[in-house]
Amino acid sequence: MKKGTKNIKTENEQSAIIYARVSSKEQEKEGYSIQAQVKLLENYASEREYCVEGQYVDVETAKHAGRTDFGKMVNFLSKKKAVASSSSKHYILLVEKTDRLFRNFKDFVMIDELGIDIHFVKENVIISPNSNSHEKFMHGIKVLMAKNYIDNLSEESKKGMLEKAEEGIYPSKAPLGYQNVVGDTGKKIIVQTPSIAPLILLLFEMYATGNYSLLEVTKQAASDGLVNRKTHKKLSKSTIHKILSNPFYYGDFVWSGKSYHGNHEPIVSKELFDKVQEILTGGHQKPRPQKHRWAFQGLLFCGHCGCAMVAERKKGKYVYYHCTGNKGACPVEYVREEGIDHQFITSLKKIQLDDDVLQWVIKALKESHDDEKTYHAGRISALEKQHRLLQDRLDAMYTDKLDGKISEDFFNRKNIEWRKEQSDILHSLETHQTANRIYIEEGVQLLELAQSAVNLYKKQNMLEKRELLNFVYSNSTWKNGLLTPNFRKPFDFLVVANEAYQKEKVAFGKKGDPCSVWLPEQDSNLRQGG
């Protein structure tokens, strides 16, 4: 935490706490930086003569996903709240946007309990203990959708990879014998490694003769100098087996369980690859009988010991589930499939919103989408400008090379560097363009699924039910005849909000204010006081 010292403190001052966060190094590189956020918030505080007492900053990466400074900030404000009665000082929290502060509903409740004013500077919104229920509701919706949106963005890279796979581009690091490079168009491509590809072909040809064992081929690889690219150690027999089994070498590849035809140059022919597979599998492989796919198997676990619940058929037609008992004797009793089915139906009702609440949520979604569109449009414009600038530099540098003003070595080095930058920019552009399109669409589709989940589930057969349940739940448990559902995100947030609203309806009648569910404790106090 950095202390602010440039504002003069007064007796009845408003002290500001600044919080800034980026969710990844990539976001920071795109310009959504800590420095930009802090500067915006400092200017905001200066214009209103707030005393900036502290700054808390978190940079999350794939390896470090925790928010150390967020916890420190909450502890600091909690201590200040405890002594607030003996001080005239009033603290406010300054953040750039809703999704910079909240990652989940728990964060929202934690900050709400502090009872402070929160200024969302870019959104031009102030949420305080005195905000009306409509403002609180709209803000709560943004918290919910911010979390869902963050989850969506975290999946964008996976979707981008899937799109590449469908275009025939392997979206990961190429296997031994190939290398990932930047092509003439500025996009990453996969080409053969000239010094290694012939050695890979030799391994296939040797093994296809049937005269060499896997161990002998492994020794040949070691003799040829083939090593692991990371450890630089000799290739093991299991690694050679993976190479000989990898369809990438004849032009296909598997991504997310699906086979694609790649646009990279094959090292071996399909005929040679098939011959090797025939030998690897012993020349003949009996077809494996397809297992019965039980509706709840793999989705349900024992609440006593944590082992999986498995199914078996009794008397030829009744399906029962029971604990595997892998950790010893378990008290869980056999349960009919129909009993579990009934409790899943009851559970699905928890994500089904009332019609009036649904309309509120859709309205909030559309308003929130306007903010996101503005942000993404700005980023798209800036990225396109950066791409054009780099292209102008490349064109000018090419002319300089022809005129002899720069060396061939310098041209090649800068050409690779700037084309890589262009490739990164194009990837960022795709992310922002896709996010702009899917934000409102996926939000509405998710709500529509929540509304129709119960009716949809009742009409489906058991295998179709399994697909729906797998989308909504993860690792639910069964104990003492009761199902304990574990909802996936963002359905867990819908359950929390919906349960709070249903309690409001019971307490205040059908015309109870749906907005109050987002700050239930405080709203209840206000109602009692009114």
Image: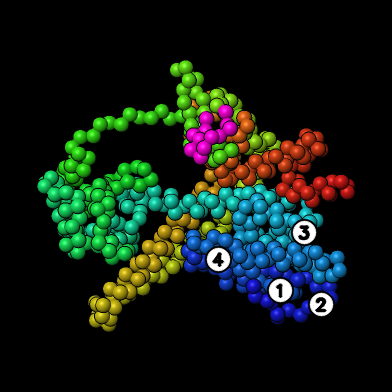
Q: Which residue is mark 4?
A: 59
Q: Are marks 4 and 2 in contact (CB under 8 Å)?
A: no
Image spot of residue 362 (x, y percent) = 63, 43
Report how far apart the C-alphas of labels 1 and 4 lie in the structure: 21 Å
Mark identifier at residue 115 = 3
Magenta span: chief secondary structure:
loop
Gap between marks 3 and 2, in whole Å? 22 Å
Q: Amino acid at mark 1?
A: Val
Residue 401 position (above or below residue 233): below
Q: Farthest residue toward the right?
A: 530
Q: What span is colored magenta in the figure?
A: 322-333
**406 in relation to 510, above or below:** below
Compared across the picture, whether 199 is left or right of 24 comes to left
Q: Nearer the viewer, residue 480 or 53?
A: 480
Q: Amino acid at mark 3?
A: Gly
Residue at which label 1 appears: 52
Picture layout, residue 478 above or below residue 528: above
Per the image, label 3 sits on a secondary structure element best described as loop
Type of amino acid under label 4: Val
Q: Nearer the viewer, mark 3 or mark 2?
A: 3
Residue placed under numbered mark 2 in the picture:
10
What residue do we see at 65% from left, 51% from top? 105
Of the residues under marks 3 and 4, which one precedes in the sequence? 4
Question: Which of marks 2 and 4 precedes in the sequence?
Answer: 2
> Is the residue 119 above or below the residue 314 in the image?
below
Cα–Cα span, label 1 and label 3: 19 Å
Q: Residue 332: within the magenta?
A: yes
- Disc 1 and disc 4 in contact, CB within 8 angstroms: no
The residue at 19%/52% (across/down) is 215
